[in-house]
Image (cartoon, rainbow, N blue to C red):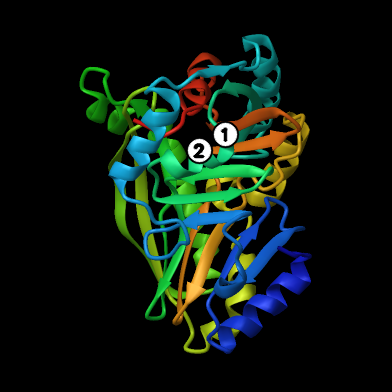
Amino acid sequence: MKVYCKEEAIDRMNALAKADVPFFFVIDYTQEHSYIETFDKIEAATCLFQFPKAGNAVKSAATRTKGLNDRYTGKIEWKISPPTPAAYKHAFELVKQNLLAGNSYLTNLTCKVPVTTNLTLEDIFLHSKALYKLWLKDKFVCFSPEIFVRIEEGQIKSFPMKGTIDATLPDAENTLLKDEKEAAEHATIVDLIRNDLSMVANQVRVNSYRYIDLLQTNKGPILQTSSEICGTLPADYPEKIGEILFKLLPAGSITGAPKTKTMQIIAEAENYDRGFYTGVMGCYANRQLDSAVMIRFIEQEGNQFYFKAGGGITAQSMCESEYNEVIQKIYVPIY
């Protein structure tokens, strides 16, 4: 697929939507590189995607499970080499200093973790169970649980996901909901997303606040909290779909608040380029758009895989618990 710069991507998305031509898109974290392709031109040999209502890789759960068992006799190798606690603490302290100085209220700190597995990227795509999945040959695989924005009947909705806990812990749901740090982080991101949607929509409101989802992983179940925020778009939104989408980027849930200053802090604290990780992927057809934030992301560099993962840091955050949360998120949803 061809790579487009930001201006080209906006123009192409606007033109395709205005002509009512269905298309698929992938946008990187900095919005400097985008893939935009019409459905009929996507080659399954190099790109597979599966969303709730669209995709080119539909297989039955039984077929997926049988294929995995036939190839690996049910045994999946999964070894990670996380950053040392000292290395993580160095980045964490830089972020914490900026938070205490009032330069940011919430900062999403991520890291790049080497992974050793007997699975290929395509295996992970085919056998993972996730709301949104994408595989680009020899590049990356993403199995994201987080919706970015959905547009239906002139309504735009966002579902920021913040707050994670091991679901097997005693009274895990109440513990997560009563956690002051997690509550503060979630409130900040909801406020940020509400402000973001206000740039492109009217009558922005929070329809549901801090509801809990259960996610299954190869390391066990986890709970995560999300909220639903909604707004009304102008009647001519299809011909401006590119402009609308790029105005909202990068996603607030993987940057923080205020967005511009926090991104500067992120660039200083993280010692790698995110690339397409924490960008967005989505599809447009029949005046409807569905998209996801590209979290739960494994990238290939040569023969080495890297899992990119992170979490939100607030002034109340403790280094050890944030470090453990990052480790908890390095999983594949194969079970």
Nearer to the camera, 204 or 151: 151
* Residue 40, quarter of picture: bottom right
Name the residue rendered at 37%, 80% in the picture.
153
Position of 329 compared to 120: left or right? left
Of helix, strand and loop, which one carries label 2? helix
Q: Around disc 1, counting alpha carbons within 10 Å, would you say few (fewer than 14), some (14 to 19), or many (20 or more)?
A: few
Q: Position of residue 296 (x, y in %)?
A: 52, 38
Identified by mark 1, the residue type is Thr
Can residue 167 be seen from the camera position used here? yes
Q: Position of residue 78 (x, y in %)?
A: 51, 20
Q: Position of residue 312 (x, y in %)?
A: 53, 34
Position of 263 compared to 174: left or right? right
Position of 145 relative to 196 (above/below): above
Q: Position of residue 193 (x, y in %)?
A: 49, 56
Which residue is farthest front? 70
Nearer to the camera, 301 or 95: 301
Name the residue rendered at 63%, 54% in the picture.
46
Nearer to the camera, 75 or 104: 75
* Residue 39, quarter of picture: bottom right
The disc placed on residue 120 is 1
Mark 2 vs 1: CB contact within 8 A: yes
**Residue beneath disc 2:** 123
